[in-house]
Every structure is written in structure tokens, then in C-alpha cells.
Image: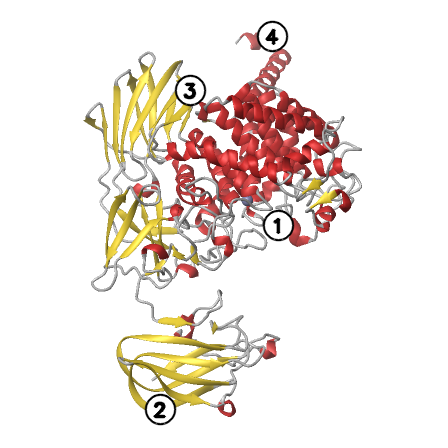
Amino acid sequence: MKASSRGPVGSVLVAVLVLLCGRAAAEASRDYPARPVPFTEVKIDDGFWAPRLATSRTVTIPACLKRCEETGRIDNFAVAGGLVKGFYRGARYNDSDVYKVLEGAAYSLSVRRDAALEKQLDEIIEKIAAAQEDDGYLSTLRTITPELDIRKTRDTPQHQLFMYGKPRWARCDHGHELYCVGHMYEAAVAHWRATGKRSLLDVAIKNAELICKTFGPRPGQIRNVPGHQEIEIALVKLYRATGRKKYLDMAKFFLDERGRYNGRTVHSHNNSITYCQDDKPVVDQRTPHGHVVRAAYMYSAMADIAALTGDERYTRAVDAIWENIVSKRLYLIGSMGVHGYLEGFGPDYVLPNLQAYNETCATVGTALLNLRLFLLHRQAKYVDVLERNMYNGILSGVSLKGDEFFYPNPLASDGRNRQHSRSPWFKTACCPSNIARFMPSMPGYVYAHTDDELYVNLYVGSTGRVKLAGRTVRITQKTDYPWEGLVNIAVEPATPGEFAILLRIPGWARGLPVPSTLYRYAGKSKSGMALEVNGRPVGINVAPGYVRIRREWKAGDTIKLLLPMPIRRVLAHPKVADNAGLVAVQRGPVVYCAEWKDNAGRALNLTLPDEMKLEADHRDDLLGGVTVITGRPAEGKPLTLIPYYAWAHRGPGEMAVWLPRKRRLFYASHVHAKDAPAALEDGREPKSSNDLDVPRFTWWDHKGRTEWVQRDFAKPRRVGSVEIYWYDDGPAGGRCRVPNSWQVLYRDAEGWKPAATVPKRDVVKDKYNRATFEPVTATAIRVEARLQGGFSGGILEWTIK
Ligand SMILES: [Zn+2]
């Protein structure tokens, strides 16, 4: 009213000023609508996580620090800083492991003072500070050997130096210089928050100032982006710690610059820019692709930018990507990543079990992303994914003892892959160091809040302290989660007052294993959920994923939540070919697997028929205390399942998360990962032996040997002929040929017997090859082929009559 009395010009001016100031204020305060209750304010005291956090503090972090010492990673800083004479040792990104373990150690210090550990960190930080060049640059490899002279390195292959490039930042695509300092910023903020010391924070700021001067859109600045994202999340953290907005702008620059080649040289071919998500502007990206860890860090940074700037284009992009991940690319254990050789995403619905990559870092990255998306949207579905990866794909990444780690986390094993055993360390040690920093920060995932809402996201025996509606509220959970679904919560506000408590009702308890159609439960189960406040029942109205209880809370108030944990069978979307006919088992948030040790030495031969009754029993004596699931078939040996995260502690051997629902009908001496014996009887008639369009069975890449494939019958059957349509991709330039000769065997009560042999002269291409014999009564038929020397072979279709 007052403004209008000043006349139109004045009122417009005031309006503009109000708008500008309003925007400035909104920008300054814009952030995630929800904030996590920091892990320093949450004390875990349950039977499940508390021992693991103790192991992380007493075993994992010291072990990782020791490995960093033994492998020269810490010495690299001392050498670069001129404190000692020596060589650069290891891969070009080795600095990052030291930073990540430092970050974890700092988290550990935040929770529990430890003078010896603090001193150890001080000493390492002294070396890091010494290694920093005068203008703030920090990369020990370049400082030790600016000319990239291989003679000044140890255990550093020549290609490492080539990918690193010179001068500084010349190889942003592969050099990892920005990636490494990103991890240093994260460590610096953690160390400063834990100890109040600025020693590492000052190193970080000095480096970030150099980065801000060097990179940017102005003439003379470098317009380029890191090939391995990480510095973006880190700059946001440094912005939050220092309030220097240019760090936030720098993070956004690195994101906005992706997929735009304004004056920068792209060193990489097209495949490589896709690999590091540099093929399109990030706001135009809609599907996940390329290297999974890079992607997960980038999407997390995109969520940060969406929250801190309110740029809706970022929200739309990261939401679409998340939607695709959970509906088409997520493994049941909450992990992602198919290709070992590219460490990358596979196509939609391609989720092989034996070859699953699921790098531990990628699962940590999935957790980072889902926490952020929860804070942005305040929906429980993100925590559903987070909980799934915490209890399965992340926990499996570290041994129960805390000193051995997985790089890939497969969903099946034949016990012969060396990567299917945990290892104390790796040459590329990203995974152990990510575990070292994830575990101690885990309590920070339990609660979140707004000004007058408290979110209980995870059910973990713990006490949290949070400032809410102008008062401190203590919240205490007592529960045996994840083994039992009863949770008792005590609420103690310092003074009585009105606020809301939002209890997450996990997707797994609402009939939704994941927030998509990618997995579903077989059959129905009564919910049986119950909720009481101060002993009185309360209706469970879930939206979106939470029960919201708004009332005047006072000290002594209690909440009792019961989430029944029936054993559930899980089925995959029909488009997931690798899980066709298979079933997995889940109880509460825990995914189960069959391991050789509990199942007469094998797991890949097991079945889980729909009618098999399953029972859960807690075994304190097994694998650190686990609930096992036992199935009792009508005949034969019982089936035992253990939590997936606990596998691979009793020596190498078979493991399977997904089991056939029906007795297996086909067996083979070997089958190529992309083929299946079911192709033998799929009714798809081949046009020629070189028909690449019909599904096939092959023994690829076994060459020149005798191989077999076998069909079991549910009950004995009269058989008098077998017709085979051999696969031969010679015309297409492949290495499969018709065999030299082949033989039919049959099995009866006495065992295997030969039925017919087809000699070389009768083996033909492009039509059915028939073997007839005196009819026999068989329980199984086996075809044995002598492959041509140097060639493999396969079958497109067969008929057994
Ligand atoms: Zn890793």
C-alpha cells in the first residue's frame, strides 16, 4: 500500500528491489528441504550395526592406513614435499586412497576421540601440506616427476604416465588430477569438522582457489571437465564449509561444461566421452550410461546443484536417470554395473548374475545419490533403495572381520573367479577406501529433519539428537532390525511441543521390493503392520512412504511399530532374461543366497520350487550371527540360505542369489554366458546353420574339445531318435563349426549308455542331422560332440523322439 502511494515508477522500483532482495535471500538460504541428522548426533547401540562400526574403527581404518603406508601411497606425499628422497610409487590416482581413508578416519574421530589416531592423521596431513606446490597445486605424481620420467617411478606402468599427460591438466579426461583433489576436499572438511583443525582445510582452500583461477569460461582459463567426476560433490562440501560461493559455481561449471566443447579439445573418441558422461550436457541426460562410479558421483552432484540453485533442469535430469536405474538397471542387492571391462552400466534389463560387476564403489555411490534425492524430494522410495544397498551390496563389500574387500559383488559364483574372494587390498584401491569412509558415516543415514518434522528413515537401535521446532529432541530406538521388525521408539523433547514424526514404512513391508516393477513378490502376504502411540493403536496411512504423526510431543512419549518379516520370494521383471524361471528370497531388507558350504558343496545345481516351505531361524553361532532360511523339500536334502552380505567367508565355492523354481531340465559341460540350453527347444526353426537371429546354445569359447549337453525327463520316456540342427557361423566370420562327429547317450536306472554315433561324413550344415537307434527307456538324453580343432560349436534346435 505504501509503495503505491509513491507513484508507479517508485512502486516498480520497490517491487524490483523486493524481488531482487527476495531472490538473493532465497538463493542464499536455498538448500535441500530436509537435512540429515549428522552422524555425530546419532549413537548406534544395536546388535547389528554397532559391532560393524566398531570393526570399521578398530580394524578397517587402521588396516587401510597401514596398506597406504606399505604401498608407498603416503610416502608419495613425503617425497613430493621433499621430506625424504625417493620415487613415485603406484598408479596415477593413488593420492585419492589416502584422502578417502583420512576422511573415514576423521569421521571415526568425530564419533570417538582417539589421540593416537589424531596424531597419525596430523603426521599424514603434514606430508600432504608439504607436497602442495606454492601456487596450491597438489598431485604427488607430477611434483615428484614433472617430466613424467618413468625412471623416477616404481610400480608405475608407462601407460599410467601416458594417461596422466603433461603439462598440468592436459589429460583431464584420464589424468585423475581433479578427481584426487576432490577427495582431498572431502577429507579436509571431515577433518576440520572432527578436530576443529584447519591444517588440511587450508590445503584444500589453497588448491580450490587455484582450480577456480585456472578453470572457467573466461579467456585464458581452461574449459574442460574431469574424466572422473568427484570434485563436483567435493566443491559443494567445501562451499558449505567455507561459505565461498565461487566453489559452488565451480562445481556447477564442471557439470554445465560436460557435453559442450566450447573451445576445448576432446582427447577421447566417442565411446570414451560416453564412458565418462561427457557426451551430452548433464541437464539433457535422461538415462544412466558409461562408468558407474563416475556416473553415481555426477548424479549426486547434480542433486546438490538442483537443491542449492533450484535449477529445475537438474532436477528433471537426475529424476529421469534415477527412474531408469530403479526400473531397469538395479540389481536386487541394490547395486548397479554389469561390465567388468568398462566398469559400466549394461543395457536396460540386462542383469547377468555370474558376471555382475556391482563395484563396491558404485554401491556406495548409489547410497550417496539416494540420500540426496530423499533430501530433495522427501519421499521414502529413495530410502528404500538406500536401505537395500546398505544391507546387501555395501555390507558384502567388506568382510565380517573388516580387513578384506570385494571389488565386484556378483549375484552368483562358480567359485573359480579370483575376484569372487575378498582381498586385503587392490592396486586400484578405490573400494576399500570407500568402505573406510562409508561405514563410519552410516549413522548419518538414520534420521533427517526439517524445521518441525523428524524423519525416521532407518530402523536401527540408536539415540539421535535433533533441533526441532526450537527445542532439542532426543529420539531412541530399540530394535533387533534387520532380523526382527519390532521397533520401540522413545521421544524426549526438552520441552513439550507440536511437531511431526514421520516413520518410514519400508517398501519391502508394503509389497514393493523396489519402487518400480523391476522386482515383485511372488504371492501375497498379509501386512500385519501395527502402530501404537503411547500404547494406543494408530491407523497406518502411508504417503509417500511415511506414516506422519503430528501432535504435541512430550518427554515419555512412546511409539511402537511392528513390521512383520515374512520370508518373501522375489521375481524379476519378465524382460530380465537372466532371471527367467528363477526366484530369489528376501526377508525384511535382507537378500539371501545359497552358498556351497551349507548345501553339500554346491549351489548352482539347487532349485527352489514354489511349493517348498521356508523357515527362518536365527543362528548366533554362524557368520557373526545371522538369520538363516531353510527349505525342506519332499525328498532330498534341505536347502539353506544365508544373507547375501555374509557369503564368501568360508572359502571359494558356488553361490547363487537366484535359484530355478523348477527342477532343472538342461545340463551342459559348458555354456556361453549369453546362450542358454532352453534355446534347443524354443521351437524357433533356423533358416540355416548360420542363422544368427534364432536363440542358440553354444559351448563357446571352448574349442577343439569334446563337449556335451543333456536333457533330463521328469519321468522315464521312450526315445528312438535325436535330430540336431548344428550351429556354424563360419560364413559370418565366426569360430563355431559343425562338430567332427557326435554321439547320443541315454541314462536309465543303471547309468549312462551309448545309443548312437554319427561319423564325420554324416555331419551336415543347414539341416537337421538325424540319429536313430533301437528305442530305449531313458531318464535323460545327452549329446556329446567332438569339436573341430581350433573351433567351438553349438546347436540351434533339436528334437528328441
Ligand atoms: Zn571401487
Looking at marks 2 and 3 on the same chain, the residue that comes earlier in the sequence is marked by 3
Quadrant in the picture for residue 5: top right
Q: Which residue is mark 3?
A: 451
Residue 109 image point, x, y percent: 50, 24
Tell me which residue sits at (59%, 16%) in the image: 21
Question: CB at mark 4 closer than 8 A to ligand 1?
Answer: no
Question: CB at mark 2 closer than 8 A to ligand 1?
Answer: no
- Mark 1 neighbour density, 10 Å: few (under 14) some (14–19) many (20 or more): many
Of the residues shown, which amino acid type is indicated by label 4? Answer: Arg
Q: Which residue is mark 1?
A: 275
What quarter of the picture does the C terminus occupy?
A: bottom left
Q: Nearer the viewer's eye, disc 2 or disc 1?
A: 2
Numbered mark located on residue 6 in the image: 4
Q: Which residue is mark 2?
A: 773
Looking at marks 3 and 1 on the same chain, the residue that comes earlier in the sequence is marked by 1
Of the residues shown, which amino acid type is indicated by label 3? Answer: Asp
Of the residues shown, which amino acid type is indicated by label 1? Answer: Tyr
